[in-house]
């Protein structure tokens, strides 16, 4: 992928295959098609009688850290087809490090696919980071792991914090990974540790948002309005949904017993208001995490992306939300299964 081109934002290199191995996961292959998206298929004419979904989002929606066939991008169309009796096609245009503005810049790609629906997968970090362009040299993909760690450590020292620099060094050790993995198996300890970090990325969980976070939310509002208007003009259903990060999922499952001054549902309510105000549809899966025992186990403890178990859970929750009437064309049982079999 190319991460440092400010004119395009993050983009995949067409017809490219690469592999990645994180300490807590399996060796994962990333195969990009001719358009630079992680989808095994090339975009072609829609199958007659099918319902086409184009999915937008960042690394969670792109299924990074898991095999493609384990991702909810691969599992969701099969589950929707089973429930609705319709042939469902899903073309995934999600890529890591794409801010809402970058997604808006590339929105013509989604429209060109002539979908029946655009499904925008949102995560908290997407709203908190409205401009993602990495420096040309320090985070270049050609750097080795050691070089990347050194640049991050140097940046921490540059901020004048010895504690931050020391933490950055320790975070890249095997001991840190093992200790963190043990800590994160406890829901309450994990939530406490995560919120104590003072990480700006967790500002969305605070009951009272910072001025900086509110500014980011306004920028998101503008980009959402832009895309929703273009989808409306093209006659395409626009649907958005927030998927939680590991801390948020753990807090929701605590059923109100989260630390004082925090509200894991606040961002969900804010995003719903924005999307609906501009004419789109918003499906809500966050409350369903209350019923899942230890939902944080569906995420890699250190990396934070969903693991295979998490993707399976997300598939089920998305299928529930999309077929319960929020999207009339996907209402469960909208087409007899026999008719679906005839179109195969």
Image: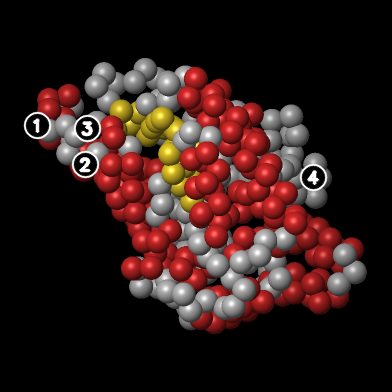
Mark 2 to mark 1 CA distance (whole Å): 15 Å
Count of labels in the image: 4
Q: Where is residue 271 shown, x and y percent of the image? A: 54, 48
Mark 2 to mark 3 CA distance (whole Å): 9 Å
Q: Please tell me whether mark 2 or mark 4 is closer to you in this view.
A: 2
Of 269 and 174, which appears nearest the observer? 269
Determine whether, in the image, residue 135 is placed left or right of residue 102.
right
Mark 1 to mark 4 CA distance (whole Å): 54 Å
> Does residue 96 appear in this view?
yes
- The local crowd at label 4, few if under 14, some if 14 to 19, many if 20 or more residues have their Cα within 10 Å, is few
Q: Earlier in the sequence, mark 2 or mark 3?
A: 3
Q: Place residue 98 in its image quadrant.
A: top right
Q: Secondary structure at mark 2?
A: loop
**Residue ID for mark 3:** 86
* Disc marking residue 338: 1
Mark 2 to mark 4 CA distance (whole Å): 47 Å
Q: Earlier in the sequence, mark 2 or mark 4?
A: 4
**Residue ID for mark 2:** 332
* Disc marking residue 312: none
> Does residue 30 appear in this view?
no
Q: Where is residue 195 shown, x and y percent of the image? A: 63, 73
Q: Are marks 2 and 1 in contact (CB under 8 Å)?
A: no
70, above or below 119, in the image: below
Q: Please tell me whether mark 2 or mark 1 is closer to you in this view.
A: 2
**Residue ID for mark 4:** 135
Determine whether, in the image, residue 135 is placed left or right of residue 176.
right
> Can you say which quadrant of the picture contains the C terminus?
top left
Q: Where is residue 213 shown, x and y percent of the image? A: 70, 55
Q: Earlier in the sequence, mark 3 or mark 1?
A: 3
């Amino acid at each position: 992928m190319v991460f440092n081109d400010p004119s395009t934002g993050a983009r995949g290199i067409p017809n490219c295959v690469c592999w990645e191995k994180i300490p807590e996961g399996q060796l994962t292959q990333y195969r990009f098609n001719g358009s630079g998206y992680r989808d095994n298929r090339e975009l072609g004419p829609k199958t007659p009688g099918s319902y086409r979904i184009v999915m937008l989002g960042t690394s969670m929606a792109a299924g990074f850290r898991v095999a493609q066939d384990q991702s909810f991008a691969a599992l969701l169309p099969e589950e929707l087809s089973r429930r609705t009796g319709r042939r469902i096609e899903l073309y995934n245009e999600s890529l890591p490090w794409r801010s809402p503005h970058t997604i808006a810049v590339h929105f013509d790609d989604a429209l060109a696919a002539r979908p029946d629906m655009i499904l925008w997968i949102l995560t908290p970090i997407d709203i908190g980071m409205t401009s993602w362009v990495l420096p040309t040299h320090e985070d270049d993909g050609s750097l080795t792991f050691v070089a990347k760690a050194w640049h991050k450590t140097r940046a921490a020292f540059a901020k004048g914090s010895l504690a931050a620099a020391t933490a950055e060094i320790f975070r890249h050790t095997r001991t840190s990974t093992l200790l963190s993995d043990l800590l994160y198996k406890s829901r309450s300890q994990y939530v406490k540790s995560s919120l104590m970090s003072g990480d700006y990325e967790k500002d969305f969980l605070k009951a009272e948002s910072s001025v900086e976070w509110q500014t980011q939310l306004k920028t998101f509002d503008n980009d959402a309005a832009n895309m929703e208007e273009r989808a409306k003009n093209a006659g395409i259903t626009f649907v958005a949904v927030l998927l939680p990060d590991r801390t948020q999922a753990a807090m929701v499952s605590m059923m109100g017993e989260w630390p004082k001054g925090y509200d894991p549902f606040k961002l969900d309510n804010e995003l719903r208001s924005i999307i609906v105000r501009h004419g789109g549809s918003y499906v809500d899966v966050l409350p369903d995490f209350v019923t899942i025992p230890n939902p944080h186990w569906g995420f890699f403890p250190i990396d934070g992306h969903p693991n295979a178990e998490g993707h399976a859970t997300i598939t089920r929750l998305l299928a529930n939300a999309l077929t319960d009437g929020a999207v009339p064309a996907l209402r469960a049982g909208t087409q007899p299964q026999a008719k679906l079999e005839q179109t195969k």
